[in-house]
Amino acid sequence: QVQLVESGGGLVQPGGSLTLSCAASGSIRSVNDMAWFRQAPGKQREFVGRVTHGSSTNYADSVNGRFTISRDNSKNTMYLQMNTLKLEDTAVYYCNAKILGRGIEYNKWGQGTQVTVSS
């Protein structure tokens, strides 16, 4: 009854920009911390960044200064603005959220969205 859905992935040239969205839906009382992770082919899933309910953020060193995470609590949606994209940013991007439902806190993952940086 609670799910996360990412959108916005695609193909972009090096140096370009892309914005991902992650929307939570279902029987939600509140959405607490939300985060982005990514997994490149042949590599482990890695942390990209996190935003708290109060919009405090922190980022992995590899994306700090290039990526910006924000959220709209009225829409239960988180965004990932990616600028100055590099070839090594190519990965499947996943969102993760701690969601308080009816008497239970879920640790939910989205299905992932592909981001490909290529010339």
Image: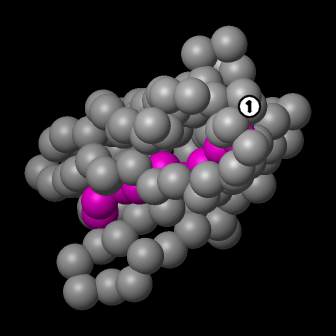
> Is residue 38 positioned above or below 118 on the image?
below
What are the residue bounds of the magenta stretch? 91-100
Q: x, y (%) of residue 61?
A: 66, 68
Q: What residue appears at the point 61 percent right and 53 percent down from the top-left corner?
A: 106
Q: x, y (%) of residue 80?
A: 52, 38
Q: What residue appears at the point 72 percent right and 28 percent down from the top-left corner?
A: 29
Q: What residue appears at the point 60 percent right and 58 percent down from the top-left corner?
A: 107
Q: x, y (%) of residue 90?
A: 28, 61
In reply to whether residue 94 is colored magenta, the answer given is yes
**Color style of the picture:** one colour
Residue that extends furthest to the top in the rendered view of this protein: 74
Q: What residue appears at the point 69 percent right and 58 percent down from the top-left corner?
A: 59
Q: Nearer the viewer, residue 32 or 104?
A: 104
**Dividing the picture into quarters, in which one does residue 91 lie?**
bottom left
Question: From where the camera sits, is residue 51 visible?
Answer: no
> Is residue 96 positioned above or below 9 on the image?
below
Mark 1 burial class by Cα count in 10 Å: few <14, some 14-19, many 20+? some
Question: From where the camera sits, is residue 85 visible?
Answer: yes
**Dividing the picture into quarters, in which one does residue 45 lie?**
bottom left
Q: Work out which quarter of the rendered image holds the N terminus and state it.
A: top left
Residue that extends furthest to the front in the rendered view of this protein: 103
| For residue 85, side relative to residue 47 (left or right) | left
| For residue 60, side relative to residue 52 (left or right) | left
In reply to whether residue 20 is colored magenta, the answer given is no
| For residue 46, side relative to residue 105 (left or right) | left
Residue that extends furthest to the left in the rendered view of this protein: 119
The rendered magenta stretch, by its main secondary structure, is classed as: strand
Q: Nearer the viewer, residue 27 or 111?
A: 27
SS at mark 1 in the image: strand
Q: Amino acid at mark 1?
A: Ser
Q: Which residue is mark 1?
A: 30
Q: x, y (%) of residue 68?
A: 62, 39
